[in-house]
Amino acid sequence: MNITYQHPFLYQTHLSLRGQSMYVRRSNSQWQPALELAVPFEEILPLRTEKVRHVPKQRLLGLLFMLAWIGQDVARHATPDFQLTTELQLYGGMILFIVAYCVYGWFNWWNVWHLRTPHLSLTLPDWPSRRKPFQQFAFSVEQRAHDYLRQEYAQINPLGPIELQLHRLHWLHRLGVLSSKELKTLSTRLTGRLSLDPLNLMGQELETPYVN
């Protein structure tokens, strides 16, 4: 699965889902790679997506000055009987165009998506044609990472190094790959105990008894 954002004369961003990683490639206006890397699934979770509004303030300021100039020119060319002259029709069309541009931009152009992993942050435009594909891509990446980590790291061997495997299980739990119930079940199967915390009995600390 992949998704591409191609902005004419500015950049191109390509994201693709691979067997063990998420591939990211961003090119500049000369189509030369400015960023290219493969993020392994071990470094993707927790994956965060956030939609924020990104208003081009300088562009809006320019439009505001243009509206002020149009208003002054309209006042200068206005007739006493307020006849609809050619100049007024032209200025009216320009004002409607600017208003339509701002309204459309507010709902379609002036939003961005932040895609964040623990070591990577990407800002992508919220284009209507890419909105649903982006959400599907982010969901697929997160689901694939969960499945991969569970398959590769959630397997236990009671004959192997216990502490290392416990550390790995707690790591998967922090990433949301294992639930609290699954963590407890696997830890019990690995250590043979319901808990590694010592028991306090009459002021003495005793080891937790084995269950198998």
Image: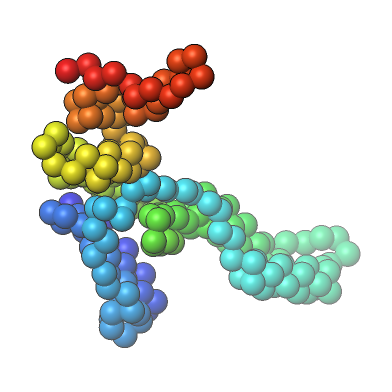
- Please say whether residue 127 is visible from this viewpoint: no
Q: Which picture quadrant has residue 147?
A: top left
Relative side of 91 to 78, left or right: left
Q: How many marks?
A: 0
Q: Which picture quadrant has residue 187?
A: top left
- Please say whether residue 53 is visible from this viewpoint: yes
Residue at 33% of width from left, 79% of height from top?
34
Question: In the depicted view, which residue is nearer to us: 184 or 20?
Answer: 184
Relative side of 163 to 90, left or right: left
Name, please, the residue furthest toward the top: 202
Residue at 30% of width from left, 25% of height from top?
184
Question: In the depicted view, which residue is nearer to us: 151 or 195?
Answer: 195
Question: In the depicted view, which residue is nearer to us: 197 or 12?
Answer: 197
Q: Which picture quadrant has residue 2?
A: bottom left
Residue 22 screen position, x and y as percent: 24, 58
Residue at 29% of width from left, 33% of height from top?
178
Name, please, the residue furthest toward the right: 80
Residue 192 screen position, x and y as percent: 21, 24
Above/below status of 179 relative to 115: above
Question: In the depicted view, which residue is nearer to us: 203 or 141?
Answer: 203
Residue 146 screen position, x and y as percent: 24, 41
Above/below status of 101 relative to 142: below
